[in-house]
Amino acid sequence: NEELTDLLAFDDTNRLRLLEDKSGVVVQNLEDAIVKSPAEIYQVLDRGTAKRRTAATLLNNRSSRSHSIFTITIHMKETTAAGEDVVKVGKLNLVDLAGSENISRSGAKDGRAREAGSINQSLLTLGRVITALVEHSGHVPYRDSKLTRLLRDSLGGRTKT
């Protein structure tokens, strides 16, 4: 049960879908915020963090109930020596992974237990993806989780992790 939630959206009823195109994975209906300064980045991050779901467990008073990905995409326009404008694009993902929980020790029941199970499953999948990358495996199971699909371009290729 992997759900995508847009923490920046004013309308929570917009259903988000993962799509793939030639540039990679795209989240359809995701809210973008255009910012011009570091202060504005912090304001957007604070707005999203305020909507993040947490709950008390026996192990933690404010346990994150989901993973969070805050993506900063930077577009930089340069003019070449020939006078041509070139746009360079860089992307930074700030990822906060919800902790792996022992369901019985955390006291999770019913919906919270299912939630913890989903969190644990996505973390296991992330671990399998990282292991496959480290071992240069022929198959990397990115598609086994929405989390790993979203982070695919940050995990493989010419990235810094």
Image (spheres, rainbow, N blue to C red):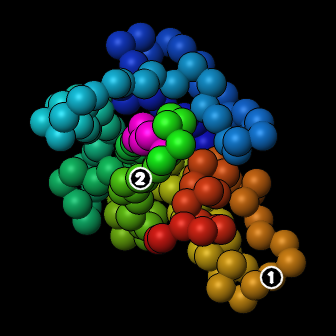
**Residue at the image position 86 percent from the left and 78 percent from the top:** 138
- Outermost residue to the bottom: 135
Whole-percent x, y for residue 8 in the image: 35, 25
What is the three-letter code of the residue carrying label 1?
Answer: Ser
Q: Which label was assigned to residue 92?
A: 2
**Residue at the image position 43 percent from the left and 52 percent from the top:** 93
Is the residue marked by circle 1 packed among few (<14), some (14-19), or many (20+) residues within 10 Å? few
Which element is circle 2 on?
A: strand
Against 22, residue 144 (above or below) is: below
Q: Which label was assigned to residue 137?
A: 1
Answer with left or right where residue 154 lies relative to residue 31: right
Answer with left or right where residue 116 lies relative to residue 74: right
Answer with left or right where residue 114 lies relative to residue 97: right
Q: Quadrant of residue 70?
A: top left
Read off the magenta span. Answer: 75-80
- What main secondary structure does the magenta stretch of the protein show? strand
Against 51, residue 93 (above or below) is: below
Asked if labels 2 and 1 touch by Cβ distance under 8 angstroms, the answer is: no
Magenta region includes residue 128: no
What is the three-letter code of the residue carrying label 2?
Answer: Leu
**Residue at the image position 66 percent from the left and 28 percent from the top:** 17
**Between residues 45 and 124, which one lies in front from this camera angle?**
45
Which element is circle 1 on?
A: loop
